[in-house]
């Protein structure tokens, strides 16, 4: 208890007065600047997600008559669309649909994928091999194709899209979890746990799963960014949220019909998508560097 | 000389494994399709009669004609037997055999994908080269920013912007493809960004890893210049992971092709796939899934076979597996 307090008291005496008086010279490296920007972008996105009404006073669904195809201006940052709706407002409100889809997609891929991976790593003999062949099949079918088929089967809609992209992310999560779990379960303390009489599900839950988490978690930002792009692409192809609801991919595909009149309808919302995915990639890079993969 | 006999069981094993993966892929799609509420016949009847439905006896005849009056398990084995003989079935929406629908769309897509891979190689070469050899440090670190940017950009968005600028602003390119150089190059360049993002990220990492190795110091100490070191020692040692990722990028290429072909109004495998999916043309979807999975499996097998040829340290794919 007294340790930190003592250290705090001792500190002023250790620091020479001359050093203390000099203003600290803060130099930002390129890495910390980009990390700061990335966190800023993500903070804005989260704020849009939680409270879209704070950032815009327009209605995302109902347009204003006579306000069609206005170019970007201080009032309408991203211009207006064919129905006189403010595009910036639709991007802000659309954040929720897209992010909800990406988060639930990652959750599906992470939970099912890591379960399959751990089970495959700890099941001996033919069953484990069979599970991994199943994962091989999932790997051999491109994720986007799989998502497209699933969404067609289920019909359009944000949650169906999320399920589609989520299922297509099972394979990478399963692979990396299996590799890590195999490595961990050969370590001595896992053996010690087994010898101490813990049941195999117990060993799995208390020793293998928590210790193989690092690289698996580092995959989350990578898959999250890819998922936003895939959801946007599916929305672009017409499988996203049904028309009046704003969603990033649908916004971009709507704008495609008015390329000649209104460049801002696709360009500016697209820029938001790019910045978001870039920010996630930057943070993901830092996480990966932390876990050395 | 002793390499070849060792290779035969390996290749045979890999082929069996590849066949198993394809069989599983086919079986899983079959099961998945059975879980859907409708089958190709009911969908076709609904579509062709505008939802009114038709005479039940005719519908029953149609079902019998296409084999849908039999239990699933019979249909599964009949279809599987046909697929093994190379008959992928009949596409109801295209009104032609599935294989012909795919083969007709193939040349345009192969041209697009091939051009995209070439452009991606050029981009990768430029970026990896500049990031390591440029005399200006700013350019070296600047080029390293590009790959994540490429990877974060939705290809359809770049495509739309390219169309907007090149076609609508300056009229340099027709909106629909006309066989000109630009109408192939621009979609290929858009598609190549996705690929280049993956290739460069992997290659930059493996080049950095090679530069960290001790033998590079030895080569430098012997007086080799930085270009010599890069061309003769680094590239060769760093190329392996690039080759592996080339095989894995087939999946990216498929998704990218669907979107790119849609944006640039090209007819190809991507648009056939998209139409098949939206028309719920199940035999066509099934055939495409099988073809794509087969391409993926074959390309990855080829990559594993070529690996030891390019990297003499790995004497055969058998040892390559042992190393990995």
Image (tube, grey):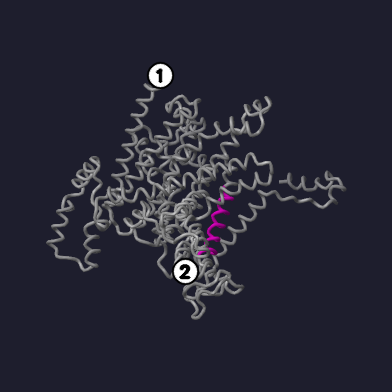
User: Mark 1 = which residue?
Assistant: B2
The secondary element bearing badge 2 is classed as loop
Residue A114, image quadrant: top left
Is residue B108 rendered to the left or right of residue B221?
A: left
- Where in the figure is residue B224, as x and y percent of width and height? 66, 28
Q: Is residue A261 left or right of residue A240?
A: right
> Range of the magenta residues?
A266-284
Between residue B171 and residue B15, name the one nearer to us.
B171
**SS assignment for the magenta stretch, majority:** helix
Task: Determine the residue located farthest toward the left in the rendered image.
Answer: B57
Density class for disc 1 (Cα within 10 Å; few <14, some 14-19, many ≥20) is: few
Q: Residues within 10 Å of mark 2 (few under 14, many from 20)?
A: some
- Report whether residue B241 is seen: yes
Q: Would you say residue A25 sits in the magenta stretch?
A: no
Do the residues at discs 2 and 1 belong to one chain?
no
Residue B133 lies, in percent from the top left, at 64, 39
- Which residue is denoted by mark 2 in the rendering? A258
Dot 1 lies on which element? loop
Q: Chain of mark 1?
A: B
Residue nearest the observer in this picture, A288 or B247: B247
């Amino acid at each position: 208890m007294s340790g930190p307090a003592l250290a705090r008291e001792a500190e002023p005496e250790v620091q020479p007065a001359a050093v203390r008086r000099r203003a600290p010279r803060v130099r930002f490296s390129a890495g910390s600047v980009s990390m700061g920007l990335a966190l800023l972008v993500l903070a804005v996105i989260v704020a849009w997600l939680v409270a879209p009404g704070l950032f815009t006073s327009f209605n995302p669904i109902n347009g204003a008559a006579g306000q069609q195809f206005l170019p970007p201006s201080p009032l309408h940052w991203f211009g207006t669309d064919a129905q006189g709706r403010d595009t910036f407002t639709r991007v802000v409100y659309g954040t929720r649909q897209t992010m909800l889809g990406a988060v639930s997609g990652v959750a599906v891929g992470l939970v099912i994928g890591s379960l399959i991976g751990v089970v495959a790593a700890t099941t001996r003999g033919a069953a484990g091999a069979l599970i991994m062949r199943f994962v091989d099949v999932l790997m051999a079918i491109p994720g986007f194709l799989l998502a497209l088929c699933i969404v067609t089967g289920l019909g359009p809609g944000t949650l169906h899209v999320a399920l589609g992209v989520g299922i297509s992310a099972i394979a990478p999560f399963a692979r990396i979890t299996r590799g890590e779990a195999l490595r961990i379960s050969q370590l001595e303390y896992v053996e010690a746990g087994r010898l101490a009489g813990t049941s195999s599900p117990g060993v799995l839950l208390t020793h293998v799963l928590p210790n193989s988490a690092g690289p698996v978690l580092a995959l989350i930002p990578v898959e999250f960014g890819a998922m936003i792009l895939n959801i946007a692409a599916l929305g672009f192809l017409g499988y996203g949220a049904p028309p009046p609801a704003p969603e990033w991919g649908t916004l971009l595909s709507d704008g495609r019909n008015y390329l000649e009149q209104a460049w801002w309808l696709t360009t500016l919302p697209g820029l938001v998508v790019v910045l978001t995915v870039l920010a996630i990639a930057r943070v993901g890079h830092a996480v990966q560097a932390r876990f050395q993969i | 000389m002793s390499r070849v006999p060792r290779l035969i069981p390996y290749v045979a094993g890999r082929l069996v494994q590849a066949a198993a993966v394809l069989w599983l892929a086919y079986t899983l799609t079959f099961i998945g399709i059975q879980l859907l509420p409708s089958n190709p016949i009911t969908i076709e009847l609904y579509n062709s009669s505008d939802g009114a439905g038709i005479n039940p006896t005719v519908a029953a005849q149609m079902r019998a004609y296409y084999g849908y009056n039999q239990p699933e398990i019979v249909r599964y084995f009949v279809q599987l037997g046909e697929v093994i003989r190379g008959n992928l079935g009949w596409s109801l929406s295209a009104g032609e055999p599935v294989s012909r629908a795919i083969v007709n769309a193939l040349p345009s897509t192969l041209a697009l994908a091939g051009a995209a891979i070439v452009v991606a190689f050029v981009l990768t070469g430029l970026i990896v080269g500049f990031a390591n050899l440029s005399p200006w440090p700013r350019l070296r670190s600047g080029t390293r920013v590009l790959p994540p940017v490429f990877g974060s950009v939705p290809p359809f968005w770049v495509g739309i912007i390219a169309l907007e600028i090149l076609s609508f602003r300056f009229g340099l390119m027709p909106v629909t493809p006309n066989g000109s150089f630009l109408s192939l190059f621009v979609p290929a360049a858009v598609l190549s960004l996705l690929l280049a993002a993956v290739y460069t990220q992997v290659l930059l990492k493996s080049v950095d890893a090679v530069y960290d190795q001790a033998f590079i110091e030895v080569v430098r100490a012997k007086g080799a210049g930085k270009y010599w070191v890069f061309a003769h020692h680094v590239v060769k040692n760093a190329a392996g992971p690039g080759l592996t990722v080339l095989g894995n990028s087939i999946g990216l290429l498929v998704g990218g092709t669907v979107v790119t072909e849609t944006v640039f109004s090209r007819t190809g495998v991507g648009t056939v796939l998209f139409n098949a999916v939206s028309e719920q043309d199940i035999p066509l979807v099934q055939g495409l899934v099988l073809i794509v999975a087969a391409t993926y499996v074959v390309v990855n097998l080829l990559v594993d076979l070529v690996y030891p040829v390019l990297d003499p340290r790995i004497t055969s794919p058998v040892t390559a597996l042992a190393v990995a």
